[in-house]
Amino acid sequence: MNLKERIGEDMKAALRAREAERLSAIRMLLAAIKQKEVDERIVADDAQVVAIVDRMIRQRRDSIEQFGKAGRQDLVEREAREIEVLSAYLPQQASEAEVAAEIDAAIAAVGAAGPQQMGKVMGLLKPKLAGRTDLAAVSAQVKARLGS
């Protein structure tokens, strides 16, 4: 069963269990997947679904930050619950040691000596680490290693 089918089955289970918040988050995810499929005239594979989930989680984190500044704790809690639901569809998160090893391997593969090769290094890392870790943090680590 691919990821998209699993999400559909989880939606049915949430519907049967009358879990309104979980159902809402899953429906939002399925709508985003369908929108991508319609816009690009494709059938989303697991990698594309993971990218959509990752993007939605980042959006929720940004919303939490904004709602926190505005003092809207109720909305912060709702967004946090949505992140919990969406996180179930991401692959197992990479440890810091795994990320460091991947960065070292990518730098060695490219033969990067300075910040100008950062794009090539990130090009190798992105498909390997997408959905498994925060790519902005990986980018900062790569920048630090290539800058020194």
Image (cartoon, rainbow, N blue to C red):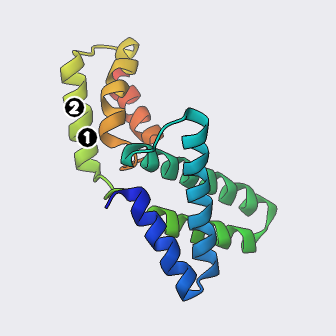
Few, some or many C-alpha atoms within 10 Å of disc 2 (few <14, some 14-19, many ≥20)? some
- Most distant residue in the bottom direction: 17
> Where's residue 32, x and y in %?
60, 51
Kindly check if marks 1 and 2 are in contact, taking CB atoms under 8 A apart as contact.
yes
Answer above or below: position of 89 versus 122.
Answer: below
Residue 66 location in percent, x, y?
73, 55
Q: In this view, does 88 lie to the left or right of 70?
A: left
Asked whether residue 131 appears in the rendered view, the answer is: yes
Spatial separation of the CA atoms under disc 1 and disc 2: 6 Å
For the residue marked with disc 2, what is the amino acid? Asp
Q: In which quarter of the image is the C terminus?
A: top left
Residue 129 image position (x, y, % from top left): 33, 42
Vertical arrangement, residue 129 with respect to residue 112, above or below: below
x 34%, y 22%: residue: 146
Per the rendering, the mark at residue 104 is 2
Question: What residue is rendered at 60% in x and 86% in y?
Answer: 18
Q: Which of 57 and 28 is in front in this view?
A: 28
- Residue 89 at least partly seen: no
Q: Which of these two is toward me, 48 or 34?
A: 34
Label 2, secondary structure: give it: helix
Q: Which of the 4 image quadrants contains residue 88?
A: bottom left
Residue 133 locus on image (x, y percent): 38, 48
Which mark, residue 116? none
Q: Quadrant of the N terminus?
A: bottom left
Q: SS of the residue at dot 1? A: helix
Q: Is residue 113 above or below residue 24?
A: above
In the picture provided, is 108 more to the left or to the right than 79?
left
Residue placed at 57% from the left, 52% from the top?
56
Residue at image mark 1:
100
Amino acid type, callout 1: Ala
Q: Residue furthest right?
A: 70
Mark 1, Cα crowd under 10 Å, few <14 / some 14-19 / many 20+, is some
